[in-house]
Amino acid sequence: GVTLSAAVSLDEDGYYDIVIAVNEKTEQHGNELEYLERLKSSVQNLSNILFEATQGKFSIRSADILLPDHWQVDADAFATSQHYHNADIRISHEFLMPETINPTLCGYPGRFIELPLNFFNKSESNRIDVKALLTLWARYRWGVHEEHGYPGDSEFPYFWKPYRLPDQPETEPEDWRVTNCANAEVTGNYQNLDGENCGVSDDSLYPPSSDCRFIPDEANQTATSSLMGFHFIESIHDFCDSETHNKRAPTRQNLYCRFLSVWEIIRESLDFKKVKVNATNSIAPINYRILKQTSKPLLYILSDGVFTPPESVIAGVATGLYSIINNTENVNLLATTTVFPSLNRTDSFDALYPLNFPSTEPEKFIDFFKNGFGTRSGFRTFAAAIQDIGNELKERRHKAGAVILVLKYGGDYDYFLPAYESEVLGTILEQNIKVFALEGRDDYVIEPALQRLTQLSGGSHFTIGTGEDDETNVASIMSAIDLTLKAGAVPPSAIELYVAHKGTILYNPENTGTPIPISVLYSNVKKVSFFLSLLNTALSSNFTITKGPDSLDQLPSFVETYIWGKSEL
C-alpha cells in the first residue's frame, strides 16, 4: 500500500489500514473486553458506511488497536511503528468531545481524530454515532468541512436568510432557514433549549434567538444528503455533490473549499487519486490486532556510512548482535540498523532495517548492518542523528528508553544539520538513552565529544582501528549492550541538565581577558558545564571564562569547560 501519513496506509483498491490508540494515562475502563468489542463493532460499521457513502470506493481492511500497558488485556503482538502520537484515531479521558485535527488546506489530509473514552460506551453502536464518526473521517482524510452552522457564530450562523444573486430577478424576501445542504427539503420545527416553540421575529428582520434549535421530523424525510450537514437524520447517507450543493449557505465548506461540494473535493483528494479506476473494493470483516508497547529498550545501530571499519570490528559487532537477537529473552526486542548521513539532505540518517523485531529474521538484520558502511559521502553528523533518534523516542513516549550503538570515524561538520552538544545531551538524559560507541580517530577531532556523551549516559566508548585491542573492545561493548537489554528499562539518569545560556562569543584579540557574565536561573544547580564550538582555533589558547558579578542567580564558580570537536558541532 501507499503510506499517506504516520500511521494510515491505503492501497490501490481503496482499502485503509489504520491505527487506533488509547492514551497511556487513561485508566482501565471497567470491563475492557466489552469496551473493545463495542469499539470494534463501531469501526466495522464505519467501514460499511464509508463504503456506502463513497459509492464503493473505500473501506477499512485492518485496524491495530494500541492499548496502555496497564490495561488487563492480552495483546496479540507488540507494537512496532505504532504509537499513540502517530495513531489515526486517538482515544483519551482528556478529550471532552469528538474532534478532527486538520490544520491543512481544503482537500488535504489532516493529522488525527480525537475521541473521548466514553464515545464507545453504548452497548450497541447506532447508525447516527457511526455517521458522526464518518464525518470526522471525511475531515481527517479528505479535508472537507461542515455544512451546518453554529449557534451564536456570526461567521457560520445557525440560521441564515438567502440573499438575491445579481442575475436573479427581484422577488419577495425569503424566510430565515437553518444552515444546511440537502438534496430535498428537510422538514421539522423550532424549539428552544427548554423545549418551547421558537422562531423568527414578527417582522422577519431578525433570526431566531441563539438558544433556538431546528428539530427535524423523525419520519417521512426524503433528503439523503448531506452527511456534513445533518448526519443525525436517519434518511441521510450521502454527501452533497455538484448538483445538490448549496453554494449560498454560509458554511465552512463554502468558505474554505471555494464553494465546491463535499463530493467534488473528495473526488479530487489524494486518497481518491491513489485508488485505481477499476478497483475491486468490497465490504469485509476488519482484521483487528490488539497491541501493546514492548517493555524493553529500543536498540538503534547508527553506522557512519562514509567509514568502513576493520573487518574484525564488523565481524565482532555482527556476532554480538546475532547473539543478542537470538536470545529468547529478547524475542520482543525492537531494533533498527541505520546509516548516516542520509541520502535526503533534510534528514540526518536513513533506516536500512526499519524498527521491527529482528528475532524473526536475524540474518536479514545482520546483512543490513554489514552492508551499510562505505555507501555514503559528503557531510555527516552523528550528533544530529542521535538528536533525531531522541526526538523519535519522545514522540513514541517509550518509557523503557533506548540503547544506541554508534560506529564512526572522525568527524565532518554538517552546516545544514547543526546539533549542539548541550541539546543532544539533554535529549539523551530526558529520554533515558544509553549510548555506546566504537570510534575511529583522526587528527581533526579536538576533544572526544562522543566519549563524553557515552560516559554521561551510562554507556561506554572504545577507540578502534589500532588493531591491538579491537576484538577485545568490541566484545566488551557488545556484552555491555546485552546486559543493558536484559536488565529491561534503561533507568532514568541522576543528572538533570538545564540550558542556562546559549549564544555566540566574538573573538577580540585586543581584549581577551574581559569576563563574560552568564546568569544561571535555577536555584538547584550545583555545577555548570560549558559546551564550546570553536570555529576559530586561535580562541582556544587565548580564551578564559571567569566568574561574573555576584548575585543570587549566579554560581560562585564554573566547575568545568567542555570543548565540542569543531567537526562535531
Image (tube, rainbow, N blue to C red):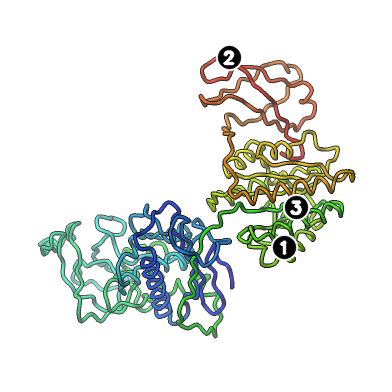
Q: Which residue is mark 3?
A: 303
Rendered-image quadrant of the C terminus = top right
Q: Which residue is mark 2?
A: 549
Q: Judging from the image, what secondary structure is the residue with disc 1 in? A: helix
Residue 222 at x, y percent in the picture:
25, 82
Query: Which is more N-terminal, label 2 or label 1?
Result: 1
Q: Quadrant of residue 439?
A: top right
Front-most of 140 and 208? 140
The kind of residue on which mark 1 rests is: Phe
Rendered-image quadrant of the N terminus = bottom right
The kind of residue on which mark 3 rests is: Ser
Q: Residue at x 46, y 57 (%)?
A: 68
The kind of residue on which mark 2 rests is: Pro
Q: Judging from the image, what secondary structure is the residue with disc 2 in? A: loop
Q: Which one is in front in this view, the residue at disc 1 or the one at disc 2?
A: 1
Q: Judging from the image, what secondary structure is the residue with disc 3 in? A: strand
Label 3, label 1: how far apart the Cα atoms are: 14 Å
